[in-house]
Image (cartoon, helix red, strand yellow):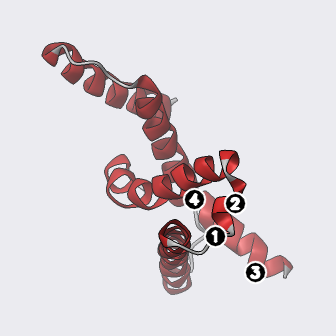
Amino acid sequence: MVLTITYSLSLARVLNCFTRTGKTIEMSEEFRNLTLQVIAEAVLSLSPEESDETFARMYLPIVEEGNLRTWHPERMYIPGPAMYKFNMDVKRLNDYVTSLIVKRWDLKQVEKKEGNDMSMLLLVHYTTNS
């Protein structure tokens, strides 16, 4: 419930800014951003600001290239700037998420506490069942 209110207020602030200026707003983009913020907080415990500044900037170019590959699957096989950029973007996102998990794991080891976010629960499950 708290997340719903928080993100609803966040979207309302964005919409209010656009109503004052009279500019057109791309709602699909706003909902995509909002969805990404919710997922980033639920799974990675990132604040909306951190999600926008880091996670979204790394994740959205991967999604955009994935959408292009849906209509042009040959893009994934043709070596060129798009392929190299996609591979670098994926590596950067993987490194970022891995660093978040490693930092939380190290913190858990130091504090000897159970994690309360989904990434920690997944990590604990993975390491105990491997």
Q: In the rendered view, does 125 fall on the left or right side of 116?
A: right
Q: Amino acid at mark 3?
A: Thr
**Residue 117: numbered disc:** 4
**Cα–Cα span, label 1 and label 4:** 39 Å
User: Would you call the spot at circle 3 few (<14 residues within 10 Å), some (14-19), or many (20 or more)?
Assistant: few
Q: Which residue is mark 2?
A: 74
Q: Amino acid at mark 4?
A: Asp
Q: Which one is closest to the eye, mark 3 or mark 1?
A: 1
Q: Which one is closest to the eye, mark 2 or mark 3?
A: 2
SS at circle 2: helix
SS at circle 1: loop
**Cα–Cα span, label 2 and label 1:** 6 Å
- Please report contact status of discs 2 and 1: CB closer than 8 Å, yes or no: yes
| Residue at x-position 59% and y-position 75% | 79
Q: Which residue is mark 1?
A: 78
Q: In the rendered view, does 120 fall on the left or right side of 23?
A: right
SS at circle 4: loop
